[in-house]
Amino acid sequence: MAGLARIEERIAGYLELRETRAYDAVGGVGFVRTQNALSRRTDRILDPMTTQIEDLRLSEEQESADAQEASNAADGRMRSLLLLSVGLALIVGLLVVVLLSRNMVPRIKRYSQFASRIASGGAGERLDVNGTDELAVLGRALNDMVDQRRSIDAREQAQTDFVDALQVTSTEQEAHELIQRRLEQSLPASDALLMQRNNSANRLQPVETSLALNSEMAIRLQDAEPRTCLAVRFARSHQEALTSGALLACHLCAGRELASVCEPLLWAGR
């Protein structure tokens, strides 16, 4: 700003000199001497201005060079930062891949082998599942499947044992007792009562001797015909809930304080 002020000052001095009309002289006595003096005076005015302009040009060039150098330095820092970011991203990605290969891949392989054993019919031990991720959810689902498979196998084995035992019973009473025990084992916290048809009197009667004569069911079975039991009438399983809203209620089971399930064992149309 100071250099520009000095240039303006020199230009103002030149304009004042020109206003004196000193440059309008065209000849006469002492013309050459006057022109020389005017030239020297003009040089004294313009030479410092020329020098100042040159200094300003050099200063501008230096500032431009400095700005270019600063820009190049900023670009270099930006490239370095970009390379550093890319390097960090690659390192993080590599760490993630390593963690996945050391943690998830073995778990996936172990779960796959476990599922293959189950599919081939083997159960074996349950999986040791930890965590809450999707693989842990899959592992728990496989364990649930194993538990269900074991439960089904246990029921099938129990049914097989029951059929084998039933085939070797020697008396009808022994067969009735076996069926009653099997029903009570299949339905925990329940009591089983077997009834049969008295063909001569066309009546339902209990086959177990432990039924108290004054119990509620004994009273209801008095003079009860086979069709009194809805399971026999419909020839299918029948349930009576505590609060039953059925259109047709069973006279033997309805209105009791316990829910009941009746399963008819019918053969040969009887």
Image: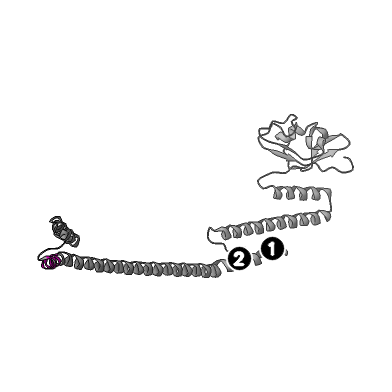
Q: Which residues are magenta?
A: 31-41
Q: Which residue is mark 2?
A: 108
Q: Are marks 1 and 2 in contact (CB under 8 Å)?
A: no
Instruction: Tell me the kind of residue under disc 1.
Output: Ile
Q: Secondary structure at mark 1?
A: helix
Q: Nearer the viewer, residue 14 or 175?
A: 14
For the C terminus, give its image quadrant. Answer: top right
Q: Is 38 inside the magenta-drawn segment?
A: yes
Residue 222 drawn at (x, y percent): 78, 32
Q: Main secondary structure of the magenta part?
A: helix
Q: Relative to 92, is 236 above or below?
A: above
Q: Residue furthest front?
A: 28
Q: Relative to 213, is 135 above or below?
A: below
Q: Residues within 10 Å of mark 2 (few under 14, many from 20)?
A: some
Marks 1 and 2, how far apart at CA: 15 Å
Q: Secondary structure at mark 2?
A: helix
At 55% from the left and 69% from the top, the residue drawn is 101
Residue 79 can be seen in this image: yes
Q: Is 119 inside the magenta-drawn segment?
A: no
Residue 214 can be seen in this image: no
Foreground disc of the pair 1, 2: 2
- Left or right, 224 with respect to 144, comes to right
Instruction: Tell me the kind of residue under disc 2.
Output: Ile
- Left or right, 80 with respect to 152, comes to left
Q: Which residue is mark 1?
A: 118
Q: Residues within 10 Å of mark 1 (few under 14, many from 20)?
A: some
At 42% from the left and 69% from the top, the residue drawn is 84
